[in-house]
Image: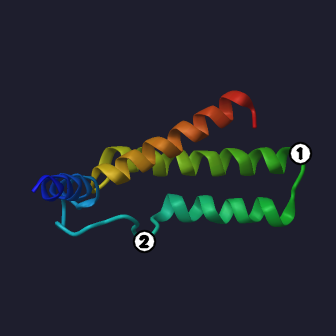
Amino acid sequence: MRFDRSVSKRASAVDWLFRSRATGRITIAQVPNLPLLLWAGLTVVRWLLHPGGSQMIALNIAAGGTIVVWAGDEIIRGVNPWRRLLGGGVLAVVAVSWWTGS
């Protein structure tokens, strides 16, 4: 009997974390939106071309800006707590990266 309650509590916690408030379906990942696609494209360009000087600075600013926009959008409009936590985590990683200069 005790086992059944712990499984039930775990199931409801998972349900709370991953269930979309908009559709009622479990949502872990979604089709990328424009800021995330732009960030991915800019990141690939940086990796492939290894530009220097002002071009690298411009790419870094553009990529950083798009991922911050994406993370902020997830925090504000995420369909479930998991998506909001994901946006907050990405925003924290970006902030630490900018703060430490890495």
Q: Position of residue 53 (x, y in %)?
A: 89, 45
Q: Residue at x 38, y 50 (%)?
A: 74
For the residues labelled 1 and 2, the Cα–Cα distance comes to 34 Å
Q: Residue 100's mark?
A: none
Left or right position of 54 against 17: right
- Per the image, the residue denoted by label 1 is 53
Identify which residue, 34 or 8, lies in the foreground.
8
Above/below status of 26 relative to 66: below
Element type at marker 2? loop
Q: Position of residue 64 (x, y in %)?
A: 63, 46
Instruction: Tell me which numbered mark, 1 or 2, is placed earlier along the sequence.
Output: 2
The single residue placed furthest to the right in the displayed view is 52
Above/below status of 72 relative to 23: above
Amino acid type, mark 2: Val
- Per the image, the residue denoted by label 2 is 31
Amino acid type, mark 1: Gly
